[in-house]
Amino acid sequence: MRPFAALVLAGLVMVIISVVPRDATASAAGLLGPGQPVAPEEMLMLWHDRAYGQLKLAILKKKAQRGVEQAWLLAELANANQGHNNDPRYKAFAASLSKLAADAAGALQDEKFDPAKDLLRQMDQQCTACHDQFRNDDDAKTQQGD
Ligand code: HEC
């Protein structure tokens, strides 16, 4: 490379470095990181419902690959759901659901349908437990005195 071209290139790189905000990568990572959902909670729950339903169907019909896909989808949705509430109990229900769904993906990968069925039941318990404590209508019931 000719010295002049090298100088221009170096100057260009320095301009780019000074123009790009230093925390650009950090803030992008924060926005897209685990526990930082971008979609509203209702939307996340609609997808929970669909993924769970499709997972159940795949297990009943013994469609392993389809089940693996839906189980991972649910695992990721539940992972993201942790960011919707700062209450540690809420995060624990969501984390537990995510773990169970990931385990189900593993079981289905090996075409183990009975263990997957058992995991499905345990997932359902997490849905119910979290809804019992955190769904708005239940909140309304417990706050009647206000
Ligand atoms: C960690 C907590 C948590 C878990 C786990 C959870 N949900 Fe929810 N879900 C909520 C909350 C909170 C709402 C209420 C949202 C609102 O009222 O804005 C909700 C609402 C819903 C709704 C909306 C309709 C309704 O009846 O109110 C559906 C459907 C739903 N969840 C399905 C599921 C399914 C299926 C699972 C399990 C696979 C699940 N959820 C697991 C917290 C959770």
Image (cartoon, helix red, strand yellow):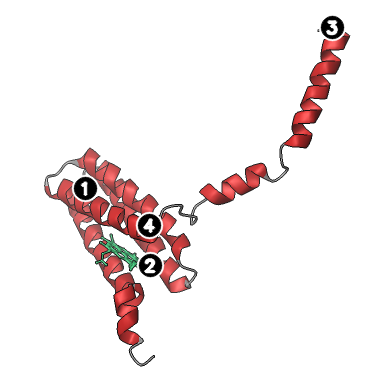
Q: Residue at x 41, y 70 (%)?
A: 90
Give percent across and percent down for residue 111: 21, 43
> Label 4: few (<14), some or many (≥20) within 10 Å?
many
* Residue type at tag 3: Arg
**Label 4 residue near ligand 1, CB within 8 Å:** yes
The numbered dot on residue 2 is: 3
Tell me which label, 3 or 4, sits earlier in the chain.
Answer: 3
Q: Quadrant of ligand 1?
A: bottom left
Q: Residue at x 27, y 70 (%)?
A: 128
Query: How far separated are the C-alphas under marks 4 and 2?
Result: 9 Å
- Callout 2–callout 3 Cβ contact below 8 Å: no
Image position of 111 with respect to 44: above or below: above
* Residue type at tag 2: Phe
Q: Quadrant of the N terminus?
A: top right
> Label 2: few (<14), some or many (≥20) within 10 Å?
many
Q: Secondary structure at mark 2?
A: helix
**Label 2 residue near ligand 1, CB within 8 Å:** yes
Q: Secondary structure at mark 3?
A: loop
* Residue annotated with mark 1: 112
Tell me which label, 2 or 1, sits earlier in the chain.
Answer: 2
* Residue annotated with mark 2: 93
Tell me which label, 2 or 3, sits earlier in the chain.
Answer: 3
Report the mark closest to the observer, 1 or 4.
4
